[in-house]
Amino acid sequence: MQDRSRRAFLAGTALALATAACGRSSPVGSPPTAAGTLRIGAIPDQDPEVLQRQHGTVADAMAAALDLDVVYSPVTDYAAAVSLFRTGDLDLVWFGGLTGVQARLQAPGAQPIAQRDIDREFHSVFVVDGATGLAPSDDLRPLAGLRFTYGSETSTSGRLMPAWFLQQAGVDPQGFPGGPGFSGSHDATIALVASGSYQAGVLNEQVWRSRLEEGAVDPAAVVEYARTPPYADYHWLLGPGVAERLGADDLAERLTGWFTGLSADDPADAGVLELFGAGSFVPARATDYDRIEEIGRALGLVT
């Protein structure tokens, strides 16, 4: 098999992860759920099958532990997750740093609930097509001449923070040949670089490491070029008025307690933590994302 064909095959593999769906799921736009239902969602940063398994498992575990009716509702894109949170169609959402800031600004009173231990110092990874011949480096300037793709336009790890670090390194984050692409998800970024559609891209480090461990990426075809400095990223955000609607004034505290109480020593809890690539969950505060908001405003992604 020729090299390019082999790489296209690997790209397809990265996009077609064979994971079984689990947990209750109710697509947004379906008939309204009961007033007592907690509807959770997530930014679609990975393949739908991965998200269904991840958040369906959370919905089931949360429902059993907190004696709530919980349903996972998939969404189509990052902007939809923010919009549906604002309108109250999603109650508890797994946001990235930037989308979480956008959602809080649009839904005053929203409360950060928890983040993973890895989210306090998260990283993005710049990857390049092996055919470029570029070796790993801390110098981002060689990326300026390559066809480059971000993830989603409002992704923290796939766009906001990488663009900021590129700018700090003297690279115009919009100045790539033909303009930057936007793949829509971290898995898609890997696939596009693997196929040669783009010569370079950037994505969430946790997804990158996970796909390498699964053998879904040929490290000779897609090369890790550079890793960003740390920043705060993903977190669960609870909408205003949800506790009142469910008749549970202590809902935020109960949710934080459940997430932070998940233990790797408990087999069921360990399954949830593994799906999120975390050792534990820790409390999250709005102030954790002050820097994200500041950079988002500087780059015109927060108004």
Image (cartoon, rainbow, N blue to C red):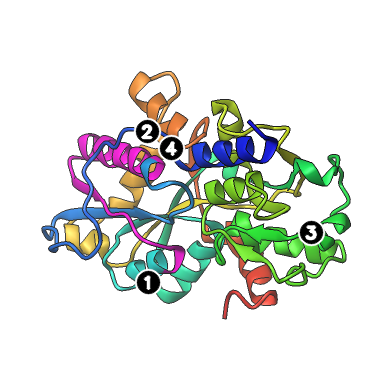
Q: Amino acid at mark 4?
A: Thr
At 24% across and 39% down in the image, what residue appears?
Answer: 23
| Residue at image mark 4 | 260
Q: Which residue is mark 2?
A: 19
Q: Secondary structure at mark 3?
A: loop
Which amino acid lies under the numbered mark 1 shown in the image of this protein? Ser
In the rendering, at what x and y percent does residue 232 appear? 62, 52
Q: How far separated are the C-alphas under marks 4 and 2?
A: 26 Å
Residue ID at (14%, 63%) = 32
Q: Is residue 177 left or right of residue 59?
A: right
Q: Which label number is shown at residue 146? A: 3
| Residue at horizontal 21 percent and vertical 35 percent from the top | 64
Q: Quadrant of residue 97?
A: bottom right
- Disc 2 element: loop
Is 198 above or below relative to 291? above
Q: Which residues are magenta?
A: 50-79
